[in-house]
Amino acid sequence: MMRLIKTEFLKYKRYNILWLGIVSVLSSIILAAFQLAGTNNSIFSYTGLSGGVVWNHFSLFLPFTFTLVVGYSINREYTDFTLKNILVVPVSKFRLILSKLIVGYGLVIFEWIFSFTVTLIIAKIMGCTDINSNSCMISLKQMFVVSTCCYIAVLPVIVIATRKQDKFLSGVIFSFFYGFCGIFLANGNLINVYPVTTGLVLSNYAHDEKIVYSPLLSIGVVVIIFVGAIILLKVFNRKHNDISL
């Protein structure tokens, strides 16, 4: 498995789709900066900028970006006819796709560090006043938790949408609306059970007093989604030669 994971990481070096992912993350951060600049406050807040990035990430950019990049990676195995070749080598389709999902989470870690770094740089450029170790740690935590939860939330979408060649784009479209709907559900107690918004609960994102956070409920949802995605992956690929083209 480790060899597969290493190979998948190396494959991303030749995937131009990564640049689209980077542009997507940058767009989220730049949009948050413009949103902050458009307020009537004369003093810009790093906390406000970071919160805006987190909000844009879960609601507009990360769900479809994760599905796009990882879905494209899996789809390349169809277009490059790799999945036909695994019939004659001791590598199951399940292990191959699982390695891609693991590498996908590695890209989530990269996105997290990249988002935090760029947000901090923009905050300094904008002259935000509350940049300190405490606010940075809160930002770091929120971005990590929200990114992780967003990735887990779209895992079933990726698994289902990549069963056949060139069908992953339907998953990308679904993931965009999946995240967008979170904007409306985040303003009520459904925030605790909607997969995309669980990250807000678990990172203790700033919220209205009328909304009651239930972290244990959100953890349960995340675990169910994760386990469900692995079960789906196993069911769809239960045979070594179960390849749909």
Image: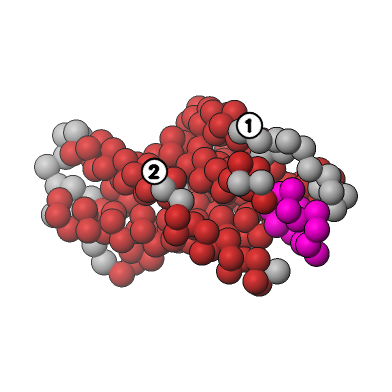
Residue 4 in picture, x, y percent from top left = 65, 66
Classify mark 1: helix, strand or loop.
loop
Q: Quadrant of residue 76?
A: top right
- Taking the image as drawn, is residue 220 in sight? no
Q: In the rendered image, which residue does mark 1 sit on? A: 167
Classify mark 2: helix, strand or loop.
helix
Predominant SS along the magenta part:
helix
Q: In the rendered image, which residue does mark 2 sit on? A: 20
Residue kind at label 2, given as amino acid type: Leu
What quarter of the picture does the C terminus occupy? Answer: top right
How many discs mark residues in the rendered view? 2
- Taking the image as drawn, is residue 175 in sight? yes
Instruction: Please give left or right for residue 133 compared with residue 3 in the image.
Output: left
Residue plotted at (56% across, 55% down): 104
Residue 70 in picture, x, y percent from top left = 56, 47
Residue at the far bottom in the pictured view:
2
- 8 above or below 17? below
> Which residues, given as a range, are shown in magenta?
83-97
Residue 137 in picture, x, y percent from top left = 38, 65
Residue 105 in picture, x, y percent from top left = 56, 58
